[in-house]
Image: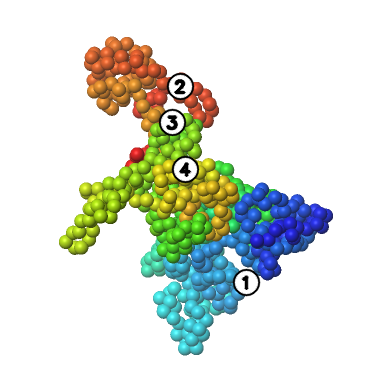
Amino acid sequence: MADPSSYRPKPGEIPDSPGVYRFRDEHRRVIYVGKAKSLRQRLANYFQDLAGLHPRTRSMVTTAASVEWTVVSTEVEALQLEYSWIKEYDPRFNVKYRDDKSYPYLAVTMSEEYPRVQVMRGHKKKGVRYFGPYAHAWAIRDTVDLLLRVFPVRTCSAGVFKNAARTGRPCLLGYIGKCSAPCVDRVSAEEHRELADEFCDFMTGRTNTYIRRLEKQMGEAAEEMEYERAARLRDDIEALKKAMEKNAVVLADATDADLIAVAEDELEAAVQIFHVRGGRVRGQRGWVTDKVEEITTGALVEHALQQLYGEETGDAVPKEVLVPALPDPVEPVQEWLAGRRGSGVSLRIPQRGDKKALMETVQRNAQQALVLHKTKRASDLTTRSRALEEIADALDLDSAPLRIECYDISHLQGDDVVASMVVFEDGLARKSEYRRFQIKGFAGQDDVRSMHEVITRRFRRYLAEKEKTGEWTDGENAEAPEIDRNGEIVGTGLTEDDGRPKKFAYPPQLVVVDGGAPQVAAARRALDELGIDDIAVCGLAKRLEEVWLPGDDDPVILPRTSEGLYLLQRVRDEAHRFAITYQRTKRSKRFRSSPLDDVPGLGETRKQALLKHFGSLKKLRSATIDQICEVPGIGRKTAETIAVALAQAAPAAPAVNTATGEIMEEEPGTMGSSGEPVTTGAPDERRGQET
């Protein structure tokens, strides 16, 4: 590990001008490339106290052994040079979008004498018009098959074309009318090129012209009683309309735009792009990247723009690019895009209307892509095994932690304090083992004390179950396990009578707490008080993703690309989700509680009838017994009971609009416009059991 002060440039050496800088390691390999409006100010940020640097930045500067820079005239030049160097050096600490496949394009080779329609992947070539990208090659072939009825352009390879020209016989498509057969001179090169131009015009969105033309020809054929020709034209029109349905109109006609959305967490980000041409979605693609450097959403967008348009020119760069966040500063990026296109490019965030609605669709696709990527990553056995081994090495465990339990505390300003316990076995969530806790030992907000209570309660139950199994008895007094007729051990005490595992019968190899050193110390202290010394404890602090161990002054820093850190993060996030879901459920139940709940014999139907009749609990409380009796189904005796219950119950706290801070006049239970009681809170989506 290098000391950044050993290669820090001397004061005054770094120019105060735009430029691009490179960090190199001891082997002279470029490990990071960056650009700056002011090289002096930017590089100074890297050579401050290491404790003040983000862990990812700290890892980069301690890996590097030297830094060098190149001065340029403008920020646009810096952007271009940064892109070139990232492509050339592939630095390990730069964001790199990785794509699990090369997206297919529908390509028309206009540079050839007889243009050919085909599926193409990889780098784009000069003289070829591209449409897409498409998610699947079969989608291209379906579209082409429909369009060849109207635009019979050549689709065969050069070898097939030459062989047909030599033999004087076209291929099968030539015989069935899906190729104009220029190979046997059925059409001239000029006529075939005109067909290719019309094919490209249709694909760029100019569709209505061709449909109107075919409809006119169909009408003329029908008037001349050429019904077979009219039927063929009718089928051609249906084929074009079917091809158009594959790309539904989403924006106004003639709109050319690319929409870019980003979904991210602390470790990874997914980018999705929709290509809209002529108001229709003509292509879709996406990438996933590891966030190996500290980066904002705007910076992720900037890298995505470089990836998309770094090799593009002309119309391949659309007039409008819609993004979720703007790069900072935005002017150089906008100027760079305009230079690639050759005319102005609008780079902005959609605020309203169809474009904002489509951006929300792209955002959902990005979120789904990130979830799918994480699911595939988590389900891979080799990856899970490597993650567990990395955790064992980092925490100095004797073996891989096959069972991990994670705990999190959740509350709302000290109210409804709850905790969650989630279980991962062999790197996968074991949701049947999830548990949730209410904090009972004290009132108020104290995460450290709450953690101590939860760990104590969980492992006290474990010790009680362990004692029931006879594991603590001496060998000569221990009961022999029961053996069934198949030779399998039964009756070990680890299962209930119905065969299900007991709640706390299995101990983990590793306890993870959501928090830093104080929470870890509380968990370790709880285990020590119970005499348990064979279970490891660690904590994962969310802000910097640091792993804390009991008694250590400094955290363990796992590499950002570590599968072990990724697994710990998933465990911690799942515990947080489970805890906050339970906390919201408790809060919503508290908000929905009513003094009417304590009236014996008063069911849900009659409670709703009372609230519907009076409008609120406040008005019901002030009503007389005779007025309560006016409600259908409420007798005098029940009305008297209701009046007594409401008189004895303390008035509920006034409802507060959390958005404005305004105290609302009506109490919880106010009627909505539909006549139904208005309630708050989240639905109960819990799993596991309450303890």
Q: Which residue bears the numbered disc 3?
A: 442
Q: CA distance from mark 2 to mark 4?
A: 42 Å
Residue behind mark 4: 525
Q: Quick one: label 2 or label 4, which is nearer the N terminus?
A: 4
Q: Position of residue 228 (x, y in %)?
A: 37, 69
The residue to which callout 2 is attached is 654
Distance of label 1 from label 4 (alpha carbons): 69 Å
Mark 2, Cα crowd under 10 Å, few <14 / some 14-19 / many 20+, is few
Q: Depth-wise, is mark 1 or mark 3 nearer the camera?
A: 3
Give residue 676's position: percent from left, percent from top.
Answer: 35, 28
Left or right, 276 with reference to 39 = left
Mark in front: 2 vs 4: 4
Label 3 – label 2 distance at C-alpha: 26 Å
Left or right of residue 46, residue 558 in this image: left
**Against 514, is 72 above or below?**
below
Q: Which of the two discs, 3 and 2, labels the residue nearer the N terminus?
A: 3
Q: Label 2 near label 3: C-beta < 8 Å?
A: no
Q: Nearer the viewer, mark 1 or mark 4?
A: 4
Kind of residue sitting beneath label 3: Phe
Mark 1 vs 2, N-terminal side: 1
Q: Secondary structure at mark 1?
A: loop
Q: Amino acid at mark 1?
A: Lys
| Tag 1 residue | 126
Residue at 43% in and 57% down: 401
